[in-house]
Amino acid sequence: MLITAEKMHKINVGCDSMADTKTPEERSKNMSHIRSTNTKPEELVRKYLFTHGFRYRKNDKRYPGKPDIVLPKYHTVIFVNGCFWHMHGCSRARLPRSNQEYWEPKIKRNAQRDQDNIRKLEDTGWKVIVVWECELKKRVAEERLQRLCEEIKN
Ligand SMILES: [Zn+2]
């Protein structure tokens, strides 16, 4: 599995270069743009799983939260979550200093929704695995993805 330095660099630059001078609307637009163009962590995970023999469905709307990856054979779903949007406790999840009153409730709602979806899935017998964007940084991605394969199978 090849994770190009360039791809990762783009992700990092995309996250770190946001100035705090932007309005929430501008930032929101930027974020979604970054998400839909540069950042494709879920693609990285899918490719890795595919080359390791796993077969999956993508963004299956039938399940709560529309999981990025559904592995019917293993009764497992995987969410590949951006740290900021899904309130991971890591450094990438830090709220911007300005407009906190805008961001905080928004991000907290996301996190609450995530929890609800995970609970619903687990209640109906699915194994739920969350892979965080920061776990897919170049230096650590391979190790995380190897571990993911084990988590799926066990
Ligand atoms: Zn993180």
Image (cartoon, rainbow, N blue to C red):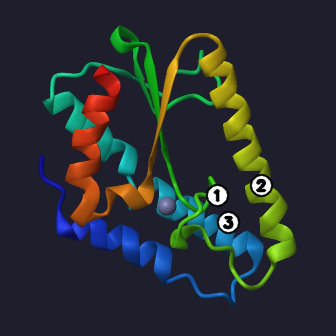
Q: Is residue 56 left or right of residue 26?
A: left
Which residue corresponds to the image point at 66% horizontal and 87% vertical from the top-left? 20
Pointer 3: what residue? Answer: 28
What's the CA distance linking mark 3 and mark 2?
Answer: 15 Å
| Tag 1: amino acid | Met
In this rendering, which labeled residue sits more in front, label 3 or label 1?
Answer: 1
| Image coords of residue 150 (percent x, y) | 26, 30
Pointer 1: what residue? Answer: 87
| Image coords of residue 98 (percent x, y) | 77, 84
- Residue 123, by quadrant, is top right
- Residue 145, by quadrant, is top left
Mark with earlier residue (1, 2)? 1
What's the CA distance linking mark 3 and mark 1?
Answer: 15 Å
| Tag 2: amino acid | Lys
Please, what secondary structure does the residue beneath circle 3 have?
A: helix
Indicate if the residue with disc 3 has its beta carbon within 8 Å of ligand 1.
Answer: no
Pointer 2: what residue? Answer: 108
Which residue corresponds to the image point at 62% horizontal and 57% vertical from the top-left? 85
